[in-house]
Amino acid sequence: MLILTASICALTAAAPASGADFAAQPVNIKAPPPQIVATINDWTGYYIGINGGWRSSHNWRDFNGITSEGCHNSTGGTVGGQIGYRWQIFNTIYGIEGQGNWADFSGSNVSTAFPAGIIGTKTGAFGLLTGHVGYAFNAVLLYAKGGAAVTSNTYHINSVATGTEIARTNDVRWGGGLGAGIEVSLTPSWSAGVEYDHLFMQGSNVTFPTAVGGDRVHQDVDLITARVNYKFGPALGR
């Protein structure tokens, strides 16, 4: 009996020590993996850029506004620049842009009213002032645009027999333009894209100082350009 009592006392004394030993063991808690934060592109800010591409202008004339002289396309290359500002509200993009381009678009046809003459058109420059609205898929921007357009044109009449110029005149014509494009951010400030525009130019009357009478001239334009922009202000990536 004495031995049993002594054993119980010894076990009782040892129990707290054993519990303390277990409680002192370190608990290894694995740290959660770091979160990956996606880059969000911000298109807000001023930008300036260059563009270049190809353009086709469809031109037709009516002698004195009555008798058709036929149609021709003026095709060629263009290069120019643009400057603008964009606002981003959530994923929607609003903007305004001015664009000016040098052009070398020329074409001609034999007049259907006066077969001895060749009528021709050359467009040397054009400009756009447009508003933009688009939607940003992070680094990719899809947009539409619309506004005012202006072209600078030269009209000439040449002899079919000799090619000699008979008459020449110039005009600046205003109209409207619609377009659409896609732009991709390449770095925090640089972006590149492609754009299509159609210009609706109003008809106008032109006179030739060295010829009798004049023409009612009609014109519309199809334009496709590649564009590169540099953006100021908030960085594209944040």
Image (cartoon, rainbow, N blue to C red):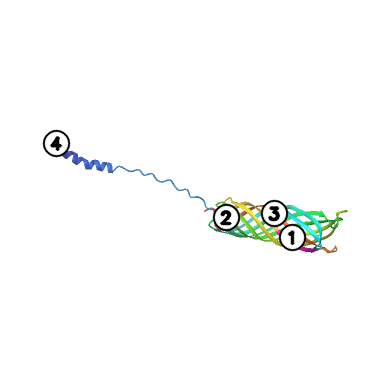
Residue 67, x across and y down, in percent? 82, 60
Q: Which residue is mark 3?
A: 223
Where residue 121 sits in the image (x, y, percent)? Answer: 78, 57
First reached walking from the N terminus: tag 2 or tag 3: 2
Q: Position of residue 187 (x, y in %)?
A: 57, 51
Q: Which residues are magenta?
A: 200-208
Which badge, 4 or 3, comes first in the chain's sequence? 4
Q: What's the CA distance linking mark 2 and mark 3?
A: 22 Å
What residue is drawn where x is 76% and y is 53%? 73
Q: Amino acid at mark 4?
A: Leu
Residue topped by disc 4: 4
Q: Foreground mark, 2 or 4?
A: 2
Category of crowding for the residue at label 1, using alpha-carbon neighbours closer than 10 angstroms: few (below 14), some (14–19), many (at least 20): some
* Front position among marks 2 and 1: 2
Residue 152 circle label = 1
Q: Disc 2 designates what residue?
A: 135
Q: Secondary structure at mark 3?
A: strand
The amino acid pointed to by label 3 is Leu
